[in-house]
Image (cartoon, rainbow, N blue to C red):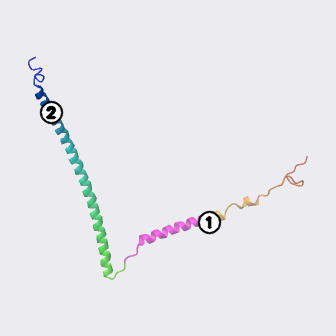
Amino acid sequence: MIGTNLLERRSKPERIADQAWQHLASAVNTAGDSIRDTARSARHTSANLADDAGDLVGSAAEEARRRATRAFDALAGRSPALPWTLLIGAALVGAAIGWAAGTAARAAGSHDRAADDIEFVDVQRPDSPAETDR
């Protein structure tokens, strides 16, 4: 019994100070965790930004190299090379469109002519072949 209620025997200002200290310590721990999380997030964000900037600088350097080569060729009097991939692609697209148009034209021209040769019989005429002997 001697050591059981030591906290209750303290004065009210001591208890309030102790509670304030506990709240402050928990706030500092929570803030420390929050600061660590924020720092970790900032590190990941900065790493992503650095990667994006590296990609941007790399593509800009590649474009600059391409333009410098073209400028050097132009100054040397060389004409630019033909865009073979574009020409081949256009030829293939043209061939596909031509094939599709030809197939559609053949299909439209060869529809079944037997449907046009149907003879309709008038059953109201007395000499109609549909009339039966009664």
Residue 105 is marked as: 1
Label 1 SS:
helix
In the rendered view, would you say 4 is above or below 48?
Answer: above
Task: Please provide percent x and percent y for residue 47.
Answer: 24, 54
For the magenta stretch, what is the residue range? Answer: 80-103
Is residue 49 shown in magenta? no
Q: CA distance from mark 2 to mark 1?
A: 91 Å
The outermost residue toward the top is 1
Which quadrant of the view contains residue 113?
A: bottom right
Residue found at x 24% / y 57%: 50
Q: Nearer the viewer, residue 55 or 38?
A: 38
Residue 20 is marked as: 2
Three-letter amino acid code of the residue under disc 2: Ala
Task: Please provide percent x and percent y for residue 94.
Answer: 51, 69
Residue found at x 13% / y 28%: 15
The outermost residue toward the bottom is 77
Three-letter amino acid code of the residue under disc 1: Ala
Quarter in which the N terminus is drawn: top left
In the rendered view, would you say 41 is above or below 63?
Answer: above
